Image (cartoon, coloured by chain):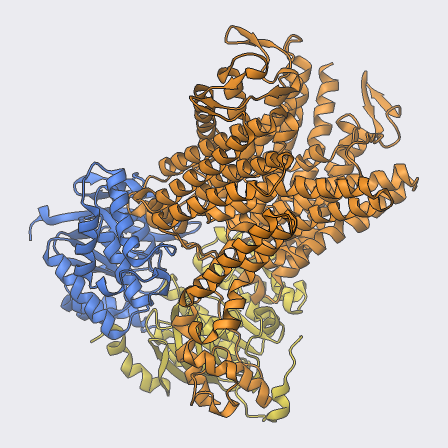
C-alpha cells in the first residue's frame, strides 16, 4: 500500500474546550479502497475529531488534508462538494420525504450545486438496488425502523458519488442481522474503491470489518494498526478496561 | 412531593427492599429503543457497578433511574415504592443524587454558584461549601472562578461535591472517569469509596471496570440494552476483556 | 445643546433597555422569543391611562396596580396556559403563537380603547417639573426613566449573582436537565422569568409614551418589540449588560440624528422612527454565522403533497366554483370576494416559503406595498376613468418585490429562522414609517415626485390586450384563475428537484449541507420567488381596493394573514386559500354584517359591536390553538376525506346534495349565507357521515367488531388489542398506572404492537 492511496490525513490536530484538550495532536489517515475504524472509550475525542474532518468543528491547531488539498478552513458544504459524505449518529433523515426521495434529493443537490451532470432517476434506482432498499422505496422515511434508516443515510450519501464516506456510529440501533448485512455493504463499497471511515462502539463489528484501526484515549492517539495488532496492544486494553492502579 | 401511591396499599413495604430497583425497564430515544428490558437492583448500603462497553445503555439506565428519562415500559422503584414517571426534581428532593455523564456542572456559573444551585434539595449553602472546600481545598481557592474554565478533574470534583454536601440516600454516578487522567480517576474513586463507607447506596456506571470493581459489592454487565450478567465483581472481571474487545 | 440631546438620548435608551431586558429574560429562560412583548407594554400603558386619567386613581396607586398586579399576572398566565406547552415545537409554531397573542392584545385594546380617540399621557410630575444642571433641563419624568433603568440594571445584576433564584435562572439557560437533578423545576423558573419580563414590558410601556411625545397609540407601542429586539441583538439575545449598551446606542443615535441632521432633510423624522429597524439590519450583518448543528427537526407538522394532476383538477374546480358562486351574490359583494382571493395569492407566498422551505416572512403585505408603488409609478396609462395598469407595470412591480425580498433576506439568511422573521417584521416597520410616509414630492434620481402622493393612490385595474379587469366579473374570474395557476405551479415546484431540496433544507439543514447544498443560495432563491408572489398578490389587492392608503399595508394585517394561513395549514395551497379568504374577505364581511345589523337594529347596536369585536379576539385565540394542531385545519379535513376513499358513493352523494343546494340558492329559496354554511358543514362533516352510513366499507373488520362491542375478555381473541388497551385494563383492574409513553414523536406503528403485546403477558 503506497502513500498515494492516502485520501484523508489529519496532522497534529488539536481541539480545546475551555480547560480541556479534547483532541491532542492527533494524526490519522484514511486510505482509498479500505475501511478504517476510529475507536476509543467515551470522551476520548472521537466525535470531536470526526467533526473536525467534516468541518462542523474548527481545530485550534493542525491541518486536515483531503485528496491532496488542505481543507482545514473549508466549510462543511465545500468539503461535501469535494467528495466527502457522511452519515449521522442521531439520524438526520428528511422526514417529510419518502425513502426514494431522500435518496433522490441528494442527486438533485449534486446537480444544482456542482457542475456534475448525473441522471438522477437512473442513479437513484441503481443506489436503491445496491443498498437493498428497493422494497421500501415508497415508504415514508419516518416509518422506517432505525436499522434500515441507517442504510437510507448511506444510500443518500452514495448518491453524491463520494470518494470518502464517513459513518458516525452506524451500528447503533441495528439488530445483529442488520449489522451483518451492513458490514457486507460497506465491504463491497470499499472493494469498489471507496474510502470508508467509521466511528463505532460495536467493537466486534470494527474488528471484523476494518483493515486499519486508530484508537483514541484522552484525546491522544494511542494506537494505529490492523485489528490483530490492536487487540493485542496493552495500551488499548488498558484504555478500555482501566488502570491496574487502584486505590 | 405530589406522588400518590396506590401501590403502597396493594403491596406492603418490607425493610429489606432495595433502595433502587428497575424492573423490566424499556426506554427509547425517538424510534431507537435503547433499553430492552433492564432488571437491576441496588440493595441498601451497597455499591453496584454497572459495567459494559459504550453504547450498551448504561447512561440511559442512569437517566431513567434519576427520573430524567421516561420509560416506555417497566417499573422504577425507590425503596420498594413504584415511582415510575417521577420527575428528576422530585427524585432529587427524595434524596436521589445523580451526577450525569461528562460535565455535571454548569459551565457558565462559578464554583460557588454551582454549589448554590445544589442547595435545591434542602441543604444550606454554608454546609455544602464547607463540605466541598474541606474535601477539595482547590475548589475553595477557585470559588469565584467559572466552572467551565477549570480542568476536567476540578469540574468532576465540583460535581462530586454535590454528593458530599447534600447527604443523599442514593448516589448515581455516570462515567466519573470520562476524559480524566488515571491518577485523578483513582482519587475520585477514593472519595466514592469513602461515601460508600458512610453507608450511602451507590450505583456507578463505568467503562473503566478495574477502578470501580474493588469498591463494588455487586457488578452488572450491560450489553445491547440488557443486563447480561450480575454477580460478584471478581467473576465479572474475568469476562471483561473478551466482552470489550470482541476477543 | 449637545448635552441636552445626550440626556434625551440616554432617557430613550433607558426605556429601550427596560423593554429589551425583559425580552432577553424570557427568551433565555424559556427559549421563546416573545413577539407580544411590545403588545404587553401597550396593554400596560393603556391600563395605566385608564386608571390614572379616566378613573382618576392616584398616580402612585395606578403605578402599583399595573406593575404589581397586571404585569406579573399577565406574564404568569401567559406562561402557565400558553408558553409552557410550547417546548419541543417548531420555531414557526412558537412564533405564530406569540404573534397570535400580539394580535389578540391589539384587538382587545382596539375594542376597549377606540383607536379613533386621541389620548395623551402626561409625564410623571408633569412636563414642568424639572431640574436644571449646567443649563441642561432634565424633567422629573426623565430622571425616573434613568433611575428605573439604572435600578433595573443593578437589580438584575444582584438577582443573577446574589440570589439563588437568579443563579438558578442562569443555570436554566445552560442545562435544564442538570437543574432538575439539583431538585429545581425549570418550568417554575421560566414562569417567574415570564412574570418579571412582562412587568418590565409594562414599565417600559408606561414610561415611553410621554418621552415620545405623549400620544398613546397602540400600534407604535406594539412595535416596541422591534426596538427592544434591536437592542437585545447587541448582546446576541443573551447578555443583559450588552443589551443595555445596545439600548443606549439606539437612544443616542435617534436623538442625535434629529438634532444634527441638516434641516432640509425633511425625511429625518421618518428615518428616526425607522432607525431601530435599520440598526437591526446593520447588526444582523455583523453577527457571526450560526454554527451548524446536527438536529433533524422532528416536528408534529405533517403535510401531504398532492400530485400536479390532482392539483390541476382542483384548480379547475376552484375556478368553476367561483363562477357558480358569483351567480349567487349581489354585485356589491364581488369586490369583497376579489379581495379575499388576492389575499389568498399573498398567502400562497407563505405556503412556498414557510410550508415548503421552513422560513418565515412576517410582512408579506409590505412586499405587496413595494410592488404596488412601483407598478403605480411605472404602469398607469391613460387618463380619467379610462386609466389602466399596464402589463409592464405589473411585471416591474413583481420584480421590485423580488429584489426587495433579496435585500431584506440577505443579512438574515446566514442566521436562524427567528432572525429572518424579525428582519421581515422590521422591514414592514420601515415600509410603514418611511416609505408610506413619503407623501410630499421630492427629488428622486433627478425626477420630482412623491412616492406615495397625498397618502392615497388610485391603482387602476389591469388591461392586457382584450383582458380588462375594469369589469368586476372579469376581475373576479381572473383572480381565481391566477390563484389556481399559481397554486398548481407551487405544487409542481414542490414536486420538482428544487422542491425536494427545499424539503431537505427544512427537515435537516445539517444533512443538506453535508450533501453539498449551498443553503444561503437556496434560501435566497425561495425567498425571492415567495416575495414575487406576494408582490403580485399585493398589486392585485391594490387594484381590488382601487383607492389605497397606508392603512391597507399595516403590519397587523400581515400578521393576521400569516397566522390565519398557519391555522388553515401553511403546508397546503388550500390553507393559503383559507387564510386569504378569512383575512381578506371574512373580516370585512363579519364587521360589515354586524355594523349593518347594528344600524338596522339600533337598540342592539352595542351588542352587535361586542360580538364583532369578540370574533376578532377569538380569531387570535384560534391562532394560539396552533400549538395543538400545528399542521392546520386543512390537514385534519384532508385526513378525514382520505379515509372516505373506500366509499366513493358518499362523495358523489355529497356532490349531488351540493348541486341541489346550489339550485335552491340560485332560485332564491335559501339565502347565500345559508347555502355557504350548509355546504361547509356538509363537507366538513362528511367523514363522520360516511362512517355512519357506510361503516362496513370503510373500516377494517376488527374495528367493525369493536364498534359492535366485543366483550372485554374476547379482545385479543376475536380482535387484536387496540392501542392503549393495556392502560385501560390496568385502570379497570385497579392496578397502578404504568409508565407514560416516552415521546410523542415515536411513530405509533413502529412501537405500539410489540410493547403492548409484552405488557399483556405481564398483566
Q: Colour of chain C?
A: orange
Depicted A246 relative to depicted C81: above or below: below
Q: Quick check: C72 above or below A182?
A: above
Report which colour depicts chain A. Answer: blue
User: Residue at left 45%, top 87%?
Assistant: C760
Identify which residue, C398 or C22, lies in the foreground.
C398
Q: Quadrant of residue C413?
A: top left
- From the viewer's perspective, is A165 left or right of C86? left
Regarding residue B205, the answer to whether it shows in the image is: no
Q: Please determine whether, in this image, residue C134 is positioned above or below residue C632.
A: above
* Residue farthest to the front, as pictured: C667
Residue C420 position within the rendered picture, expressed as x and y whole percent measured from the top left = 50, 38
Q: Position of residue B41 (x, y in %)?
A: 47, 85
- Residue C83 in the image: x percent, y percent? 62, 55
Q: Is residue B85 above or below residue C110?
A: below
Q: What colour denotes chain B?
A: yellow
Picture coordinates of residue A190, whole percent (x, y): 13, 57
Q: Quadrant of the C terminus of chain A?
A: bottom left
Image check: B151 left or right of C336?
Answer: left
Amino acid at each position: 500500500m503506497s502513500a498515494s492511496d492516502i485520501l484523508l490525513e489529519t496532522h497534529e490536530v488539536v481541539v480545546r474546550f475551555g480547560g480541556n484538550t479534547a483532541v491532542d495532536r492527533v494524526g490519522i489517515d484514511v486510505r482509498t479502497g479500505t475501511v478504517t475504524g476510529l475507536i476509543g472509550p467515551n470522551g476520548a475525542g472521537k466525535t470531536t475529531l470526526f467533526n473536525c474532518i467534516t468541518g462542523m468543528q474548527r481545530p485550534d491547531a493542525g491541518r486536515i488534508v483531503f485528496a491532496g488539498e488542505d481543507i482545514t478552513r473549508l466549510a462543511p458544504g465545500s468539503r461535501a462538494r469535494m467528495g466527502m459524505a457522511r452519515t449521522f449518529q442521531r439520524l438526520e433523515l428528511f422526514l417529510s420525504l419518502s425513502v426514494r426521495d431522500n435518496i433522490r434529493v441528494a442527486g438533485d443537490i449534486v446537480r444544482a450545486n456542482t457542475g456534475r451532470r448525473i441522471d438522477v432517476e437512473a442513479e437513484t434506482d441503481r443506489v436503491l438496488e445496491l443498498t437493498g432498499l428497493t422494497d421500501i422505496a415508497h415508504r415514508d422515511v419516518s416509518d422506517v425502523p432505525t436499522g434500515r434508516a441507517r442504510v437510507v443515510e448511506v444510500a443518500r450519501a452514495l448518491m453524491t458519488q463520494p470518494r470518502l464516506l464517513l459513518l458516525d456510529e452506524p451500528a447503533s440501533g441495528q439488530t445483529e442481522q442488520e449489522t451483518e448485512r451492513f458490514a457486507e455493504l460497506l465491504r463491497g463499497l470499499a472493494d469498489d474503491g471507496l474510502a470508508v471511515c467509521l466511528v463505532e462502539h460495536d467493537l466486534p463489528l470494527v474488528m471484523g470489518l476494518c483493515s486499519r484501526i486508530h484508537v483514541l484515549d484522552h484525546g491522544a492517539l494511542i494506537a494505529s494498526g490492523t485489528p490483530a495488532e490492536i487487540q493485542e496492544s496493552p495500551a488499548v486494553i488498558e484504555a478500555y478496561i482501566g488502570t491496574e492502579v487502584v486505590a | 412531593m405530589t406522588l400518590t401511591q396506590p401501590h403502597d396499599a396493594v403491596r406492603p413495604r418490607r425493610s429489606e427492599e432495595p433502595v433502587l430497583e428497575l424492573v423490566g425497564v424499556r426506554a427509547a430515544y425517538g424510534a431507537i429503543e435503547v433499553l430492552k428490558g433492564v432488571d437491576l437492583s441496588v440493595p441498601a448500603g451497597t455499591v453496584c457497578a454497572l459495567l459494559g462497553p459504550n453504547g450498551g445503555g448504561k447512561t440511559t439506565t442512569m437517566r431513567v433511574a434519576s427520573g430524567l428519562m421516561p420509560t416506555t415500559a417497566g417499573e422504577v422503584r425507590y425503596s420498594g415504592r413504584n415511582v415510575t414517571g417521577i420527575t428528576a426534581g422530585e427524585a432529587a428532593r427524595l434524596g436521589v443524587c445523580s451526577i450525569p455523564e461528562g460535565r455535571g456542572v454548569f459551565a457558565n456559573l462559578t464554583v460557588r454558584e454551582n454549589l448554590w444551585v445544589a442547595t435545591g434539595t434542602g441543604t444550606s449553602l454554608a454546609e455544602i461549601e464547607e463540605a466541598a472546600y474541606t474535601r477539595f481545598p482547590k475548589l475553595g481557592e477557585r470559588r469565584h472562578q467559572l466552572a467551565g474554565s477549570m480542568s476536567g478533574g476540578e469540574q468532576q470534583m465540583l460535581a462530586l461535591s454535590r454528593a458530599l454536601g447534600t447527604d443523599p440516600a442514593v448516589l448515581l454516578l455516570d462515567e466519573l472517569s470520562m476524559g480524566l487522567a488515571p491518577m485523578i480517576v483513582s482519587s475520585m474513586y477514593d472519595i466514592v469509596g469513602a461515601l460508600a463507607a458512610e453507608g450511602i447506596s451507590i450505583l456507578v456506571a463505568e467503562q473503566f471496570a478495574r477502578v470501580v470493581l474493588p469498591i463494588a459489592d455487586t457488578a452488572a454487565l450491560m450489553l445491547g440494552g440488557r443486563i447480561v450478567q450480575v454477580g460478584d465483581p471478581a467473576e465479572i472481571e474475568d469476562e471483561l476483556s473478551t466482552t470489550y474487545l470482541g476477543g | 445643546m449637545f448635552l441636552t440631546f445626550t440626556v434625551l438620548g440616554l432617557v430613550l435608551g433607558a426605556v429601550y433597555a427596560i423593554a429589551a431586558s425583559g425580552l432577553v429574560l424570557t427568551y433565555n429562560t424559556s427559549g421563546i422569543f416573545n413577539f407580544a412583548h411590545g403588545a404587553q407594554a401597550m396593554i400596560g400603558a393603556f391600563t395605566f391611562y385608564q386608571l390614572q386619567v379616566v378613573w382618576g386613581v392616584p398616580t402612585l396607586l395606578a403605578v402599583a396596580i399595573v406593575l404589581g398586579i397586571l404585569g406579573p399576572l399577565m406574564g404568569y398566565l401567559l406562561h402557565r396556559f400558553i408558553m409552557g406547552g410550547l417546548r419541543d415545537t417548531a420555531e414557526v409554531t412558537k412564533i405564530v403563537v406569540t404573534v397570535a397573542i400580539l394580535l389578540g392584545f391589539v384587538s382587545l385594546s382596539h375594542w376597549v380603547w377606540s383607536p379613533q380617540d386621541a389620548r395623551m399621557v402626561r409625564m410623571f410630575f408633569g412636563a414642568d417639573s424639572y431640574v436644571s444642571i449646567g443649563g441642561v433641563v432634565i424633567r422629573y419624568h426623565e430622571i425616573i426613566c434613568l433611575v428605573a433603568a439604572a435600578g433595573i440594571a443593578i437589580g438584575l445584576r444582584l438577582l443573577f449573582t446574589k440570589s439563588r433564584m437568579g443563579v438558578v435562572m442562569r443555570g436554566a439557560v445552560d442545562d435544564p436537565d442538570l437543574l432538575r437533578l439539583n431538585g429545581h423545576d425549570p418550568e417554575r423558573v421560566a414562569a417567574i422569568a415570564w412574570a418579571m419580563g412582562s412587568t418590565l414590558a409594562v414599565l417600559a410601556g408606561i414610561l415611553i409614551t410621554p418621552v415620545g411625545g405623549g400620544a398613546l397609540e397602540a400600534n407604535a407601542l406594539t412595535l416596541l418589540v422591534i426596538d427592544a429586539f434591536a437592542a437585545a441583538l447587541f448582546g446576541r439575545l443573551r447578555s443583559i449588560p450588552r443589551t443595555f449598551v445596545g439600548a443606549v446606542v439606539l437612544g443616542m443615535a435617534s436623538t442625535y440624528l434629529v438634532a444634527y441632521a441638516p434641516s432640509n432633510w425633511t425625511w429625518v423624522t421618518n428615518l428616526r422612527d425607522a432607525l431601530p429597524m435599520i440598526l437591526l439590519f446593520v447588526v444582523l450583518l455583523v453577527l457571526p454565522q450560526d454554527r451548524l448543528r446536527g438536529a433533524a427537526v422532528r416536528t408534529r407538522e405533517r403535510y401531504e403533497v398532492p400530485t400536479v394532476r390532482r392539483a390541476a383538477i382542483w384548480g379547475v374546480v376552484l375556478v368553476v366554483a367561483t363562477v357558480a358562486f358569483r351567480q349567487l351574490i349581489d354585485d356589491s359583494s364581488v369586490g369583497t370576494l376579489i379581495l379575499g382571493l388576492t389575499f389568498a395569492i399573498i398567502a400562497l407566498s407563505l405556503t412556498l416559503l414557510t410550508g415548503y422551505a421552513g422560513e418565515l416572512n412576517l410582512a408579506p403585505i409590505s412586499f405587496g406595498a413595494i410592488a404596488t408603488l412601483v407598478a403605480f409609478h411605472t404602469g398607469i396609462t391613460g387618463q380619467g376613468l379610462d386609466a389602466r395598469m399596464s402589463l409592464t407595470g405589473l411585471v416591474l412591480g413583481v420584480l421590485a418585490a423580488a429584489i426587495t425580498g433579496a435585500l431584506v433576506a440577505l443579512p438574515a439568511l446566514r442566521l436562524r429562522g427567528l432572525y429572518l422573521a424579525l428582519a421581515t417584521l422590521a422591514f414592514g416597520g420601515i415600509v410603514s414609517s418611511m416609505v408610506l410616509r413619503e407623501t410630499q414630492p421630492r427629488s428622486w434620481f433627478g425626477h420630482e415626485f412623491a412616492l406615495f402622493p397625498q397618502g392615497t393612490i388610485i391603482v387602476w385595474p389591469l388591461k392586457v390586450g382584450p383582458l380588462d379587469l375594469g369589469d368586476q366579473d372579469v376581475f373576479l374570474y381572473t383572480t381565481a384563475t391566477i390563484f389556481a395557476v399559481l397554486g398548481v405551479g407551487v405544487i409542481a415546484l414542490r414536486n420538482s428537484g428544487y422542491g425536494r431540496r427545499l424539503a431537505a433544507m427544512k427537515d435537516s439543514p445539517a444533512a443538506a449541507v453535508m450533501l453539498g447544498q449551498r443553503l444561503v443560495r437556496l434560501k435566497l432563491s425561495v425567498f425571492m420567488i415567495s416575495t414575487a408572489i406576494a408582490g403580485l398578490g399585493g398589486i392585485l389587492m391594490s387594484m381590488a381596493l382601487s383607492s389605497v392608503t397606508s392603512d391597507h399595508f399595516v403590519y397587523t394585517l400581515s400578521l393576521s394573514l400569516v397566522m390565519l394561513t398557519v391555522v388553515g395549514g401553511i403546508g397546503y395551497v388550500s390553507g393559503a386559500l383559507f387564510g386569504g379568504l378569512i383575512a381578506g374577505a371574512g373580516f370585512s364581511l363579519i364587521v360589515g354584517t354586524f355594523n349593518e345589523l347594528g344600524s338596522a337594529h339600533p337598540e342592539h347596536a352595542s351588542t352587535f359591536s361586542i360580538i364583532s369585536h369578540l370574533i376578532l379576539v377569538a380569531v387570535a385565540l384560534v391562532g394560539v390553538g396552533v400549538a395543538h394542531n400545528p399542521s392546520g385545519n386543512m390537514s385534519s379535513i384532508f385526513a378525514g376525506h382520505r379515509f372516505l376513499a373506500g366509499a366513493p358513493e358518499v362523495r358523489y352523494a355529497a356532490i349531488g346534495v351540493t348541486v341541489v343546494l346550489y339550485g335552491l340558492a340560485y332560485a332564491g329559496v335559501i339565502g347565500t349565507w345559508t347555502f355557504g354554511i350548509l355546504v361547509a358543514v356538509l363537507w366538513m362533516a362528511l367523514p363522520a357521515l360516511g362512517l355512519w352510513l357506510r361503516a362496513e366499507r370503510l373500516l377494517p373488520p376488527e374495528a367493525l367488531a369493536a364498534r359492535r362491542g366485543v366483550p372485554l375478555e374476547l379482545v385479543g381473541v376475536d380482535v387484536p388489542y387496540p392501542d392503549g388497551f393495556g392502560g385501560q385494563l390496568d385502570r379497570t383492574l385497579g392496578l397502578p398506572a404504568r409508565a407514560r409513553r416516552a415521546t410523542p414523536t415515536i411513530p405509533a406503528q413502529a412501537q405500539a404492537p410489540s410493547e403492548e403485546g409484552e405488557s399483556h403477558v405481564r398483566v
